[in-house]
Image: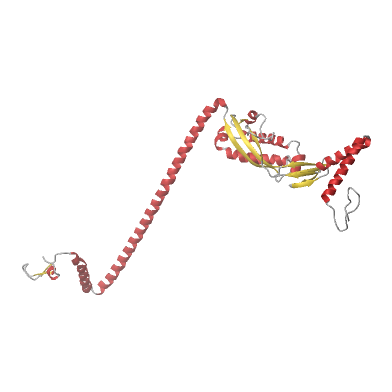
C-alpha cells in the first residue's frame, strides 16, 4: 500500500513507503486548517464541534490514573463499589462514570493526642483541643495530663471508605474513650510510674476490639504513652514523690545487687565445707576400717603363735623407730657397768 502525497494526490513508487513523519505533519496541518475553517464559519455546527472536541480531550485526560506503590485504588462505578486496583498505571471510564480513590494501605499512619508534630499534613493527626484530650481522672480521683500516640494501618480499603462516614475522626473518639477508661481503672501512681506498659497493652486490645466492632477496616499497630504529668498546681509535689520513689528503687536495687553478690559466695563456701567434711569422714572411716582389718589379722596370727608374733611386732617397731634417732647406745643387761657398749653411729660412718 502506498501513502498519498498531500500536495498532488498521486501515489509514491511501488514498493517504497513515504516518510511517515512528513505525512503525519501534513495530516495534522489539514486537520487544523479544517478546524479553523469550521470555527471561522460560525453557526451552531461549529459550537457543537468545539464542545465535542473538548469532551473528547477531557475524557482522554480523565481516563487513566496512577496508583502509588504504597497504596491501592478503590474504584466506584456510578457511586457503587466495583473493585480494588493494585499499584501501577490503570484506565477507567471517563466523565465521572468511574471514580478512583487512593487509599494508603502499606503506610503506617498515626494520631497524636495532647501534642502536635510540626509539619503534619493530616488534619486528623493532630488534636483540635489537646488540653481537653489530655485531662483525665484516675481511679483514686486524682487528675493527670496524659499524652499518647496511636499508630495504625488501613487493612480493608472498602470498609474504611464505606462502612464509617469519618473513620479517622471516629478513631480519635475511640482512642480517647478507651484511654479514659483504662486510666480511670488505675491510681495516679500507677499511671505516672509503674503502669505505663500495662496501660499501653490494654488500650491497644480495647481499641482494636472497637475498631473491629465498628467495621472500620483499621488495624491498630501500637499505642505509645508519651508525657504523663500531674496538673501544674501539684506538679512540684508529685516530682518530689517521684524522686523519692526513684531513690527507693535505687536502694532496693543496690541491696539486691549486694545480696546477689554475697549469697552465692556463701552458698559456694558452704558447699565446699560440706564436701570437705564428707571427704574427711570417708577418709577416717576407711582408715578405721583398715586399722580394724589389720588388727583382726594380727590377732589371728597372735593366737596361733604368741611368742613369734610378739617378737615380730617388737622388731617391726624398732625398725620404724630407730632410723629417726641420731645417737644410739646398746647396753648389755648382763654386764654390771656401762663400759660394754656398742656405738652404732660409728659403724654408720658418723662421729660422736
Identify the residue at image location x=53%, y=29%: 238
Observer-nearest of 280 and 263: 263
Query: Which residue is farthest top?
Result: 233
Q: Position of residue 314 (x, y in %)?
A: 20, 69
Identify the residue at image location x=55%, y=26%: 234
| Quarter that holds the C terminus | bottom left
Say left or right for 111 vs 163.
left
Q: Position of residue 6 (x, y in %)?
A: 88, 48
Q: Position of residue 274 (x, y in %)?
A: 38, 54
Observer-nearest of 203 and 291: 203
Q: Is residue 116 above or below residue 31?
A: above
| Quarter residue 142 falls in | top right
Can residue 78 be seen in the rendering of this structure? no
Say left or right for 126 vs 159.
left
Q: Is residue 340 above or below residue 93?
A: below
Observer-nearest of 245 and 286: 245
| Quarter residue 29 falls in | top right
Can residue 44 be seen in the rendering of this structure? yes
* Image coloring type: secondary structure
Q: Position of residue 193 (x, y in %)?
A: 55, 35
| Quarter that holds the N terminus | bottom right
Identify the residue at image location x=71%, y=36%: 168
Observer-nearest of 300 and 312: 312
Amino acid at each position: 500500500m502506498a501513502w498519498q502525497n498531500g500536495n498532488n494526490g498521486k501515489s509514491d513508487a511501488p514498493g517504497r513507503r513515504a516518510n511517515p513523519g512528513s505525512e503525519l505533519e501534513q495530516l495534522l496541518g489539514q486537520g487544523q486548517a479544517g478546524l479553523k475553517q469550521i470555527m471561522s464559519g460560525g453557526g451552531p455546527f461549529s459550537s457543537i464541534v468545539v464542545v465535542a472536541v473538548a469532551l473528547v480531550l477531557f475524557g482522554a485526560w480523565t481516563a487513566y490514573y496512577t496508583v502509588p506503590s504504597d497504596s491501592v485504588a478503590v474504584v466506584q462505578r456510578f457511586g457503587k463499589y466495583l473493585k480494588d486496583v493494585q499499584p501501577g498505571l490503570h484506565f477507567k471510564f471517563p466523565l465521572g462514570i468511574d471514580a478512583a480513590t487512593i487509599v494508603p494501605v502499606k503506610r503506617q499512619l498515626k494520631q497524636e493526642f495532647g501534642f502536635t508534630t510540626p509539619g503534619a499534613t493530616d488534619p486528623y493527626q493532630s488534636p483540635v483541643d489537646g488540653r481537653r484530650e489530655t485531662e483525665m481522672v484516675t481511679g483514686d480521683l486524682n487528675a493527670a495530663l496524659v499524652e499518647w500516640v496511636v499508630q495504625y494501618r488501613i487493612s480493608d480499603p472498602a470498609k474504611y471508605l464505606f462502612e464509617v462516614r469519618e473513620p479517622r475522626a471516629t478513631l480519635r473518639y475511640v482512642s480517647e474513650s478507651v484511654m479514659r477508661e483504662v486510666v480511670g481503672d488505675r491510681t495516679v501512681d500507677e499511671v505516672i510510674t509503674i503502669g505505663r506498659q500495662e496501660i499501653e497493652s490494654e488500650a491497644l486490645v480495647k481499641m482494636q476490639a472497637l475498631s473491629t466492632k465498628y467495621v472500620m477496616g483499621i488495624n491498630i499497630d501500637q499505642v505509645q504513652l508519651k508525657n504523663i504529668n500531674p496538673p501544674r498546681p501539684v506538679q512540684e509535689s508529685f516530682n518530689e514523690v517521684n524522686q523519692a520513689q526513684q531513690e527507693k528503687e535505687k536502694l532496693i536495687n543496690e541491696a539486691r545487687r549486694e545480696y546477689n553478690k554475697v549469697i552465692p559466695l556463701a552458698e559456694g563456701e558452704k558447699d565446699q565445707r560440706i564436701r570437705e567434711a564428707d571427704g574427711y569422714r570417708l577418709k577416717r572411716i576407711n582408715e578405721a576400717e583398715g586399722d580394724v582389718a589389720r588388727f583382726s589379722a594380727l590377732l589371728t596370727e597372735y593366737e596361733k603363735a604368741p611368742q613369734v608374733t610378739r617378737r615380730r611386732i617388737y622388731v617391726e617397731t624398732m625398725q620404724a623407730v630407730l632410723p629417726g634417732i641420731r645417737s644410739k647406745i646398746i647396753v648389755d643387761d648382763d654386764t654390771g657397768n656401762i663400759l660394754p657398749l656398742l656405738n652404732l653411729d660409728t659403724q654408720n660412718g658418723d662421729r660422736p
